[in-house]
Amino acid sequence: MIDKIPYVSYVNTETNIMMLKHKKITGSTFINELEKDGIIVAKVPGESDVLKKYIRATLGTDEDIKFFAEALKKIKK
């Protein structure tokens, strides 16, 4: 589902925690955009310019993932 969104990339994981980045906006802007839909995510800790582009999201149920994916699709900047 999330892998079908062309402007979002993520680090593959076997857990319910994902590191994602938007290809056109900063991590901080990404966080702000998701908060507009009531989604709370976190910055990935670290000082590296690469890490500053990523956010961290904890996902639960399939319903959570669908809601998250729909919110991601709205962010097309």
Image (spheres, helix red, strand yellow):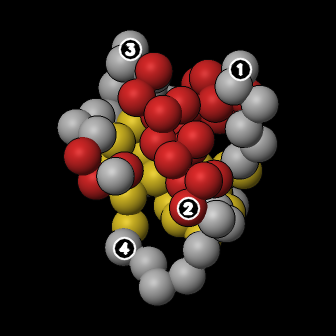
Q: Which mark is residue 77?
A: 3
- Residue beneath disc 1: 36
Q: Which mark is residue 72?
A: none
Structural distance between the alpha carbons of marks 4 and 1: 26 Å
Binning the other alpha carbons within 10 Å of mark 3 as few (below 14), some (14 to 19) or many (20 upward) gives: few
Residues at discs 4 and 1 in contact (Cβ within 8 Å): no
In what quadrant of the picture does the C terminus appear?
A: top left
Amino acid beneath label 4: Asn
Amino acid beneath label 2: Asp
Q: Position of residue 28 (x, y in %)?
A: 63, 32
* SS assignment at label 1: loop
For the point 64% across and 30% down, the residue is: 34
Structural distance between the alpha carbons of marks 2 and 1: 21 Å
- Residue beneath disc 2: 62
Q: Nearer the viewer, mark 1 or mark 3?
A: 1
Q: Position of residue 44 (x, y in %)?
A: 63, 58
Between disc 1 and disc 3, whose residue precedes?
1
* SS assignment at label 3: loop
For the point 45% across and 21% down, the residue is: 74
For the point 37% across and 50% down, the residue is: 2
Q: Quadrant of residue 21?
A: top left
Between disc 2 and disc 3, whose residue precedes?
2
Structural distance between the alpha carbons of marks 1 and 3: 14 Å
Q: Quadrant of residue 27?
A: top right
* SS assignment at label 4: loop
* SS assignment at label 2: helix
Q: Which mark is residue 12?
A: 4
Q: Quadrant of residue 39?
A: top right
For the point 77% across and 31% down, the residue is: 38
Residues at discs 4 and 3 in contact (Cβ within 8 Å): no
Amino acid beneath label 3: Lys
